[in-house]
Amino acid sequence: MKAPDGNKLAILQALNKGEFISGQAMGEQLGISRAAVAKHITSLQEMGLDIYKVNGKGYRLSRPLSLLKQADIELAYQQLDGSGCHFEVQPIIDSTNTELMRRVQSAEASNNSVLVAEMQQKGKGRRGRTWQSPFAANLYYSYYWRLDDGMHAAMGLSIAVGLAVYDSLKALYDLEVQLKWPNDVLVDGRKLAGVLVELDGTAEGPCHLVIGIGLNISMPQAAAEQIDQPWCDLNEFAGELDKNQLVAVLTCFLQKRLVQYRQTGLQGMYQQWNRVHAFSGQYVELSSGTNTWRGICEGIDEQGAVVLRVDGQSKRYFGGEISLRVKSTG
């Protein structure tokens, strides 16, 4: 699928005013035929947008969209006294993480670059999973950060990023979320956001990190049918919201957490994380490859490892996918 052209984006902007508009009126404004307008509408619907038509009235979006605008992000960021970040908005991209990592590897990315997109064609989750990324529905966000202390120093970074997401949602919407090790953000056991940190570098030399955050905002039903776990989106809790303000606030809190992480690691953060982690005191199963462990989840330690109480002993694990299982009584 190609990125939307100027006419398609102009039609989307017209539809986003919240009123019916006829195909003839849009065609006259853009200097194209009604048939061309109809083709653009069909293409937007194929991207996952919920657009309906009423005879005699025209077209309308089922609900307004919060569209990304670089100038609005930059203004909101400046109003928060943010500094040092460069923002870029793309309509459609394969993956914000993939594109930013390409730029990092070709030395075309500057430190503290932020890339956001309206749609991802190959959105990535952990362990090769696909992140559902319909057009203008959610937030697809990547941040480039250089860490000069080597890959080992980045071991617990997803913990800091999760806290930055927590900080942002609490500040903007007074929303209390829970964090699931190592990279999920939940509300009442349903996934709201995920973190994917990708690294390029050497064990001892500079380490280049691309921090990806996917946040459900207004997930259309067609895309939701492809999700194989309980989920929720921000519209359920926050109503109408400004995606540009969200990008700016998230960036500011992420910068603060990264500064803290660079200075003291997780020393000042792991206890904060433990206060909001989703599986506190619950019986869980941790799987990594062909290995499986079960025990009571005690949270994380100062290095970001998850701690399970297994047979009366606390054991630390650094990798894997954690999921809740009902404790057998048989």
Image (spheres, rainbow, N blue to C red):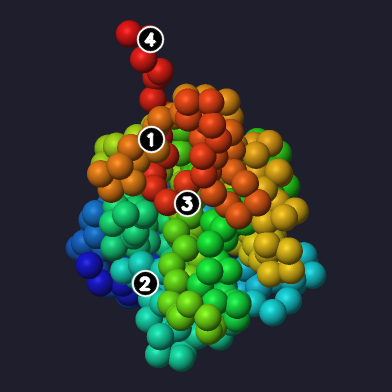
* Residue annotated with mark 3: 318
Numbered badge on residue 329: 4
Q: Do the residues labelled 2 and 3 touch (CB within 8 Å)?
A: no
Quarter of the image with the C terminus in it: top left
Mark 2 vs mark 4: in front: 4
Residue sitting at 36 percent across and 72 percent down? 98
- Secondary structure state at the residue bearing disc 4: loop
Rendered residue at 68%/36% (across/down): 275
Labels 3 & 4 near each other (Cβ < 8 A): no
Three-letter amino acid code at disc 1?
A: Trp
Q: Where is residue 39 in the image (x, y as percent from the top left)?
A: 21, 61
Q: Is residue 113 above or below residue 106?
A: above
Name the mark on residue 98.
Answer: 2
Q: Where is residue 123 in the image (x, y as percent from the top left)?
A: 34, 60
Residue type at numbered disc 2: Thr
* Residue type at the position of mark 3: Phe
Tell me the CA gap for discs 1 and 4. Answer: 17 Å
Label 3 neighbourhood size at 10 Å, few (<14), some (14-19), many (20+)? some
Rendering quarter of residue 274:
top right
Counting from the top left corner in percent of width and height, residue 224 is at 32, 40
The CA distance from mark 2 to mark 3 is 24 Å
Which residue is under mark 1?
A: 293
Residues marked 2 and 1 touching at CB (< 8 Å)? no
Q: What residue type is labelled 4?
A: Thr
Cα–Cα span, label 2 and label 1: 32 Å
**Which type of secondary structure does the marked residue at label 1 adopt?**
strand
State which tag comes first along the sequence, 1 or 3: 1
Q: Earlier in the sequence, mark 3 or mark 4?
A: 3
